[in-house]
Amino acid sequence: MTLKLDWFGFAEGAVNDTRGIMTLVGFAPQFLRYKTFPAVSSLALVVLIEDDENPEPILTEGKQFTLALTLKAPDGKVILANQPALTVGEKKDVGDLPGRLNLVLQMPMTFSKPGQYTASITLQVEGSEEMVQADRVISILEE
């Protein structure tokens, strides 16, 4: 039983296409430019977690988990913190592919000044010692 981070990063938006597959707009930007500060953006943080289901799945329907998220300013100050409790939904029939959890957290983020901002996540599944942690950095530049 192992959870693996498949991808974690920023996107300008996320929607499901006509097939029900997640589609990202402006994904994985290295930087964003703003004319004035503070600048507000509604970026999406996208998290893809895989469950190898060996010998048993961890991400089963109805299982509770938490996703702790922080966003730190260049000086290390936490400017955004959120820890929603979420529930694993119904697994779609995709043959023998392992379970996968696709999460999108889109919320307003205020960048007070140019610099390197760091987003950190920690995913913990109820009743499991499995934990997934990751960090991503985005540069905020002045035009």
Image (cartoon, helix red, strand yellow):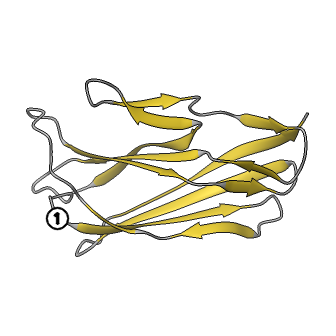
Q: Give how far across and how far down residue 81 sits, in percent.
A: 60, 69
Q: Residue at x 87, y 48 (%)?
A: 114
In screen coordinates, is 136 left or right of 30? Answer: left
Disc 1 target residue:
62
Query: SS class of the residue under badge 1?
Result: loop
Q: Is residue 83 above or below residue 133?
A: below
In screen coordinates, is 121 left or right of 58? Answer: right
In screen coordinates, is 84 left or right of 139? Answer: left
**Total of numbered circles in the picture?**
1
Q: Give how far across and how far down residue 70 sits, in percent.
A: 60, 65
State which quadrant residue 38 falls in.
Answer: bottom right
Q: Quadrant of the C terminus?
A: top right
Q: Give how far across and how far down residue 35 sits, in percent.
A: 90, 38
Residue at the farthest bottom position:
127
Residue at the farthest top position:
18
In screen coordinates, is 65 left or right of 92? Answer: right
Q: Residue at x 77, y 60 (%)?
A: 73
Q: Residue at x 56, y 32 (%)?
A: 27
Q: Is residue 137 above or below residue 57?
A: above
Q: Residues within 10 Å of mark 1 (few under 14, many from 20)?
A: few
User: What amino acid is found at the position of numbered circle 1 in the picture?
Assistant: Gly
Q: Is residue 34 above or below residue 90?
A: above
State which quadrant residue 6 falls in.
Answer: top left
Q: Is residue 47 above or below residue 143?
A: below
Q: Quadrant of the N terminus?
A: bottom left
Of residue 108 and residue 111, the one placed in the foreground of this image is: 108
